[in-house]
Image: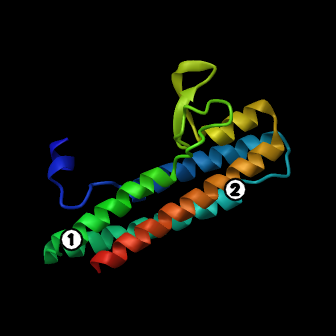
Amino acid sequence: MLRLANADVLPYDYVEFARTMRRFANQVETSIADKKWKSSAAELTSAIARLEEAAVAFGGARDRALTAQPSRAALREVNAKLMRVERELTRPEGLVTRPWFRNLIYASDENNGYATMVLPSVNEAIRAGEEKSVSKELTDLAHRFDAAAQLLRDAAALIK
C-alpha cells in the first residue's frame, strides 16, 4: 500500500497482466473448440496482444520519464489514464447473469462462491451452451481490451 500511495506513477504491471490474460484467452479457445463451435477467441487474443504491445511501450516511457522527472501535472494525467484502464475492463450493467458483478476479468463462480471465474462473461456463456452469447461477449471484451490499450498509448504519449 505504501508503494501505491507514494508512487509518482501507479505501479501497475500491464505487461504481466496481458500475458496472464493471453493464457486465459487460450483456455477459452480450447473450451470453444471442445464444443465444436464456429466461434473463436481470435479477436480477443489479438486485442490482448495489442494491450501487451501498448503495455511494453508504456513501461519504457514510464521508466524513461521517471528519470527525467516530468511535471506533476503530466504524472497526474498519466495516473488518471491508468485508473481508466481498469475501468475499461468493467461493464456498468454488470454480467448478464449477475448485474452486481461489473468486473469482466474476475468474478466469483456462481456455482461455487469460493472459486474465482476468469473472464466470467465469456465463461458463463460457454457453460450455458450459448454460442451466440459467447461470440457477443468475446467481441465486447476485445473492444474493452482495445480501449484499455489505447489508454496506455495515450498515457505513454503524455510522458515521452
Disc 1 secondary structure class: helix
Amino acid type, callout 1: Ala
Query: From the viewer's perspective, is 100 left or right of 122?
Result: left
Query: From the viewer's perspective, is 71 left or right of 61?
Result: left
Locate residue 45, reporting x and y percent.
Answer: 62, 58
Q: In the image, is residue 99 above or below residue 21?
A: above
Residues marked 1 and 2 touching at CB (< 8 Å): no
> Quick one: quadrant of the C terminus?
bottom left
> Quick one: quadrant of the N terminus?
top left
The residue at 55%/53% (across/down) is 22
Locate residue 120, reporting x and y percent.
Answer: 61, 37
The residue at 73%/40% (across/down) is 31
Which corner quadrant of the image does residue 70 belong to?
A: bottom left
Which corner quadrant of the image does residue 128 belong to?
A: top right
Would you name the residue on which mark 2 appears? 139
Number of the label disc, if any, that sits on residue 40: none
Would you name the residue on which mark 1 appears? 73
Q: Nearer the viewer, residue 111 or 34?
A: 111
Amino acid type, callout 2: Thr
Q: In the image, is residue 143 above or below residue 31?
A: below
Q: Nearer the viewer, residue 40 or 108?
A: 108
